[in-house]
Amino acid sequence: MQKLQIQVRTQCRRCGALMRADLDELVARYGGNASLIDCQERCRMVACDGATFYLAARRYGGPWRILLDDAALREGLTICPPAHLALGRAAPSADIAGVLVPQRR
């Protein structure tokens, strides 16, 4: 992913916050052969104790794919709050896991 300059972000299951993920930091932490599929971490938003999952896009502006393969981990995604940017704005329309997410107005 790092060599191909794949775009990576996290989304919190509890608060819905989207955050950029730094691949250099992830490689330093987990190693170059680690996989982000089914990997979860604590949310970095202040006062949130939720868990985040990873999303990836091949290029800037491309469709985002949820990096969850395990059925039990994917199951709870239907009750997650809407994705939003850290500034509180709704996330731009994006093709996440093949489903078009409409912009809020």
Image (cartoon, helix red, strand yellow):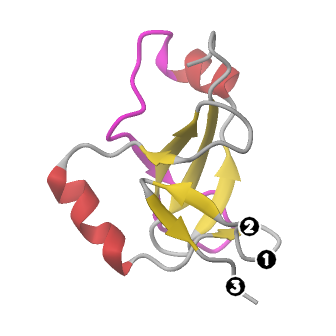
Q: Position of residue 66 (x, y in %)?
A: 43, 48
Amino acid identity at mark 1: Arg
**Element marked by disc 1:** loop
Few, some or many residues within 10 Å of mark 1 (<14, 14–19, 20+): few
Q: Which residue is mark 1?
A: 89
Q: Label 2 to label 1, Cα distance in Å?
A: 5 Å
Q: Label 1 to label 3, Cα distance in Å?
A: 9 Å
Q: Position of residue 14 (x, y in %)?
A: 47, 74
Amino acid identity at mark 2: Leu
The residue at 61%/45% (across/down) is: 9
The residue at 54%/39% (across/down) is: 56
Q: Earlier in the sequence, mark 2 or mark 3?
A: 2
Q: Classify the position of the C terminus by image quarter.
A: bottom right
Amino acid identity at mark 3: Arg
Few, some or many residues within 10 Å of mark 3 (<14, 14–19, 20+): few
Nearer to us of marks 1 and 3 is 3
Q: Position of residue 98 (x, y in %)?
A: 42, 55
- Residue 35 quadrant: top left
Q: Which residue is mark 2?
A: 85
Left or right of residue 102: residue 105: right
Q: Which mark is residue 104?
A: 3
**Element marked by disc 3:** loop
Q: Nearer the viewer, residue 24 or 61?
A: 61
Left or right of residue 105: residue 3: left
Q: Is residue 30 above or below residue 72?
A: above
